[in-house]
């Protein structure tokens, strides 16, 4: 099983807390994110990560899955 980190974020994207839960695959983490949103009324969305890999973001107001992207490092000019 994979250990996912669920960051409970405010509308500005600031994560005041997080929880870690195991799930067998990425899509199995989706209902966990929904339960966390239900339990934490102040959270605007949940950002889900697998280590350094962003998995998805689940918003309270838009219950679809939104991809989360990590910052892309820029290469120096050749």
Image: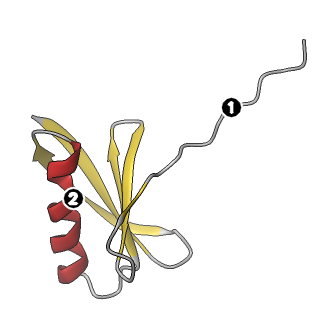
- Give the side of residue 24 with respect to residue 16, left or right: left
Residue 28: x and y, percent?
14, 50
Residue 57, compared with residue 62, is above or below; it is above
Residue 35: x and y, percent?
15, 73
Residue 64, compared with residue 2, is above or below; it is below
- 66 or 78: nearer the viewer: 66
Which is nearer the N-term, disc 1 or disc 2? 2
Judged from the image, the secondary structure of the residue bearing numbered disc 2 is helix
Q: Which image quarter is the C terminus in?
A: top right
Hey, which quadrant is residue 9 in on the image? bottom left
Hey, which quadrant is residue 63 in on the image? bottom left
Residue 62: x and y, percent?
39, 77
Residue that mark 2 sits on:
30
- Give the side of residue 37 with respect to residue 76, left or right: left
- Give the side of residue 2 with respect to residue 68, left or right: left
Residue at image point 21% right, 71% down? 34
**Outermost top residue:** 78
**Outermost front residue:** 64
Residue at image point 68% right, 31% down? 73
Dot 2, crowdedness within 10 Å: few (<14), some or many (≥20)?
many
Residue 7, compared with residue 70, is above or below; it is below
Q: Nearer the viewer, mark 1 or mark 2?
A: 2
Residue 1: x and y, percent?
9, 34
Judged from the image, the secondary structure of the residue bearing numbered disc 1 is loop
Spatial CA distance of label 1 from label 2 is 28 Å
- 51 or 69: nearer the viewer: 69
For residue 73, which numbered disc appears in the image? 1
Dot 1, crowdedness within 10 Å: few (<14), some or many (≥20)?
few
Residue at image point 56% right, 75% down? 12
- Give the side of residue 33 with respect to residue 76, left or right: left
């Amino acid at each position: 099983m994979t250990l996912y980190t669920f960051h409970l974020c405010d509308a500005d994207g600031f994560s005041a807390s997080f929880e870690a839960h195991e799930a067998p695959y990425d899509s199995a983490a989706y209902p966990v994110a929904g339960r966390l949103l239900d339990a934490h009324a102040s959270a605007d969305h949940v950002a889900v990560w697998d280590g350094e890999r962003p998995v998805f973001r689940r918003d309270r107001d838009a219950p679809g899955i939104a991809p989360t992207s990590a910052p892309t490092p820029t290469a120096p000019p050749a």
